[in-house]
Image (cartoon, rainbow, N blue to C red):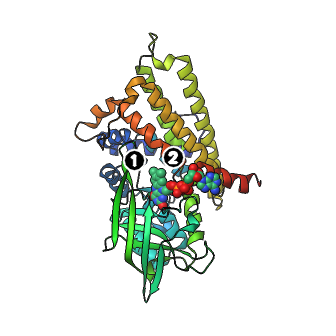
């Protein structure tokens, strides 16, 4: 995996520094836990520990501008960091606060909001969830019905949110709510920061078909939000949400993790028998399928690097982020499908206990690769839905890239 991209000497030196740090500071317990995690987000138990290690090193805010406590790394350096973390099996970081909200606060927040929230996102004192989707308002987000009515220095929020990832761990939610029901649908929406540690907030779990508790319903009843926790102007929520969603779809690099998982699948296949006397890795059909996926992931990597170049010039990811999201989701489901097939009938075994590490040592659980592969296969179906479904991305590409 080393030299597939020809990085400049200073970037190779940077990469070597990251590698050394990961070798000495990323404990095997966290690596094994991450390998045995079927969901997109790591369980806070391992994610927070990794967050603390990076925080102490000063690398947690690797994608923030320096003036807000970030590393000031260039887009290529950030990419190298993400790639090395993926190759080393580092647990996923809590991106909702660290990447999505932080980028909004840096761009739209008041100095007071930046001072109040950014340090607590970094230290892990606050854990954020994203309250956008509602029953009946997912793809058609602008039809959301949660209301926020002004009452003196507060908004009073009533409504419900759904599919809220990690709301059961979160103490704060960034939320879209309708502050003006007379304005046209997009115009009446505002972006609010909600403290979930107050009466009126109820979180109810949704257990997915894989057995994961990752998403929730959230009910908001007369929830109070100080006006100082309105981000941007009243009615500007839609513009801010679009900025955030572009970052969600295109601001992340998906290829590093895909390439790392393909490399791991190749290692596993070399150990698995094919049923014809040789290893699965030498099976021509399997090897071809894996090679095709690797080529696609490398092509995605080039696209992501091209977007990073644009970010470096101060441009936004724009509609290209929809292409990245679409291709990455397709590859994610294909890699996870092939991984499950690699285990044959053992892939039918579904362990719904979570986390898949814990009672036994993570290493022991990981050796039961089929359990993880089966859970991942089921979980990865959600990739074609969250952050905007495949069909919605195709619509955006048709309108804004192909101009149909
Ligand atoms: C695992 C997971 C985690 C999530 N986490 C969060 C979260 O943390 N916070 C949050 O706010 N939301 C979250 N979501 C919600 C997610 O953003 C929505 O599920 C998604 O936007 C789709 O909305 P919907 O579920 O209402 O489906 P719908 O919008 O009802 O879509 C149903 C079907 O119709 C298709 N469709 C809809 N509109 C169009 C169109 N215009 N053209 C063509 N086809 C269309 C869709 O592609 C889909 O196949 C999460 C979802 C999942 C699955």
Label disc, if present, on residue 383 of the rendered structure: 2
* x, y percent for residue 272: 41, 20
**Outermost residue toward the front in this view:** 136
Q: Residues at badges 2 and 1 in contact (C-beta under 8 Å)?
A: no
Q: Residue beneath label 1, please?
A: 208
Q: From the viewer's perspective, is 287 left or right of 365?
A: right
For mark 2, does the 10 Å Cα neighbourhood hold few (<14), some (14 to 19), or many (20 or more) residues? many
Residue drawn at point x = 42 percent, y = 39 percent:
376
User: Quick check: 81 above or below 174?
Assistant: above
**Residue 218 lies in what quarter of the image?**
bottom left
Residue 249: give x, y in percent of width and height: 56, 54
| N-terminal-most mark, 2 or 1 | 1
- Occupied quadrant, residue 342: top left
Residue at the left extreme, as displayed: 359
Q: Find out if the beta carbon at label 1 lies less than 8 Å from the nearest ligand 1 atom.
A: yes
Q: Taking the image as drawn, is residue 99 in sight?
A: no
Circle 1 — which element? loop
Residue 315 visible from this viewpoint: yes
- Identity of the residue drawn at 51% across and 64% down: 103
Question: Where residue 279 sits in the image (x, y, percent)?
Answer: 45, 16
Residue 1 relative to residue 58: left or right: right
């Amino acid at each position: 995996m080393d030299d597939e991209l020809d990085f400049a000497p200073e970037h190779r030196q940077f990469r070597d520094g990251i590698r050394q740090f990961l070798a000495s500071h990323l404990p095997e317990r966290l690596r094994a836990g991450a390998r045995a995690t079927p969901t997109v987000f790591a369980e806070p138990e391992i994610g927070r520990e990794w967050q603390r290690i990076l925080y102490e090193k000063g690398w947690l805010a690797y994608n923030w501008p320096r003036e807000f406590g970030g590393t000031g790394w260039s887009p290529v350096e950030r990419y190298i960091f993400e790639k090395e973390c993926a190759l080393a099996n580092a647990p996923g970081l809590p991106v909702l606060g660290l990447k999505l909200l932080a980028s909004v606060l840096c761009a739209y927040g008041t100095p007071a909001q930046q001072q109040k929230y950014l340090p607590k996102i970094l230290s892990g004192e606050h854990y954020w969830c994203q309250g956008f989707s509602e029953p009946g308002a997912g793809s058609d987000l602008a039809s959301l019905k949660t209301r926020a009515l002004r009452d003196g220095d507060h908004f009073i929020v009533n409504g419900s949110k759904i599919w809220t990832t990690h709301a059961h761990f979160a103490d704060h939610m960034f939320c879209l709510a309708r502050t003006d029901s007379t304005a046209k649908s997009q115009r009446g929406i505002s972006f609010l920061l909600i403290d979930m540690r107050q009466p009126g907030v109820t979180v109810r779990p949704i257990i997915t078909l894989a057995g994961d508790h990752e998403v929730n319903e959230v009910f908001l009843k007369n929830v109070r939000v100080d006006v100082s926790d309105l981000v941007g102007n009243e009615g500007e929520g839609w513009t801010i949400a679009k900025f955030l969603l572009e970052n969600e779809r295109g601001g992340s690099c998906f290829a590093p993790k895909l390439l790392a998982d393909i490399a791991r699948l190749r290692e596993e296949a070399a150990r698995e028998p094919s049923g014809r006397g040789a290893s699965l890795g030498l099976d021509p059909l399997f090897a071809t399928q894996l090679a095709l996926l690797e080529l696609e992931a490398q092509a995605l990597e080039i696209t992501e690097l091209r977007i990073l170049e644009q970010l470096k010039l101060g441009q936004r990811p724009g509609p290209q982020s929809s292409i990245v999201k679409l291709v990455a989701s397709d590859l994610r489901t294909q890699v996870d499908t092939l991984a499950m097939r690699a285990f044959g009938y053992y892939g039918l075994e579904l362990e719904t206990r979570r986390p898949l590490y814990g009672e036994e040592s993570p290493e022991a659980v990981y050796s039961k690769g089929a359990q993880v592969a089966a859970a991942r296969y089921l979980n990865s179906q959600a990739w074609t839905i969250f952050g905007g479904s495949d069909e919605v991305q195709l619509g955006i590409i048709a309108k804004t890239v192909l101009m149909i």
